[in-house]
Image (spheres, rainbow, N blue to C red):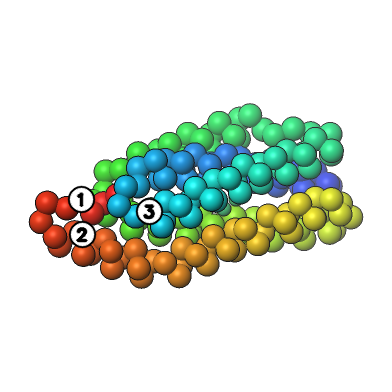
Amino acid sequence: MATPTENLLDWLRDAHAMEQQAEKMLKAQAERLEHYPELKARIEQHIVETQGQQELLGNCLQRLGSSPSTIKDMSAKLMAFGQAMAGMTVSDEVVKGAMSGYVFENLEIAAYTVLISAAKAVGDSETQRACEQILPQEIAMADWLRDHLPQITEAFLARSAAPNTEAKR
Ligand code: MG
Ligand code: FE
């Protein structure tokens, strides 16, 4: 068994590892994008947000007398590296990347929804506030990606059909 506070701490560490993974994936995507400047700029904006999220989560962990899990953070980074490498080998990298980004943002939305609920149950209003600050950033990023998927797809298709034009990134 575990107390609600222990579960909350566990989920905070998971979220910190998730944000490490997010930063690594977003950076890999932004660094490679060349022909999709709007997407690149939005990803770069979210990298800054993601770093702020890591700090907020780190502060919550510290306040609760814990710290981020190095092992979880490391395996998250490794996973992100694997995903980034896999993404580079596909000819429709930009489309697959935007799709994966949308899925990942929704995972984050679910994680913070759970955390807010757990923080409420424990009566940890500071963790609740931190997660309520993060959640809208994830929703905004998910919404942006979904709204722009058609445009990204159209741009990719046009570049893909043109001679001597790189489309994938
Ligand atoms: Mg995030
Ligand atoms: Fe995010």
Task: Give x and y (percent) for residue 34.
Answer: 32, 47
The residue to which callout 3 is attached is 37
Task: Give x and y (percent) for residue 42.
Answer: 48, 55
Name the side, left or right, on which 65 lies relative to 143.
right
At mark 2, the secondary structure is: helix
At mark 3, the secondary structure is: helix
Task: Give x and y (percent) for residue 41.
Answer: 45, 52
The residue to which callout 2 is attached is 159
- Amino acid type assigned to the residue bearing label 3 in the image: Pro
The residue to which callout 1 is attached is 166
For disc 3, the neighbor class at 10 Å (few under 14, some 14 to 19, many from 20) is few
- Disc 1 to disc 2: CB gap under 8 Å: yes
Name the side, left or right, on which 110 lies relative to 154.
right
Which residue occupies 52% across, 63% down? 142
- Disc 1 to disc 3: CB gap under 8 Å: no
Sequence order check, earlier mark of 2 and 3: 3
Sequence order check, earlier mark of 1 and 2: 2
Q: Nearer the viewer, mark 1 or mark 3?
A: 3
Res. 37 visible in picture: yes
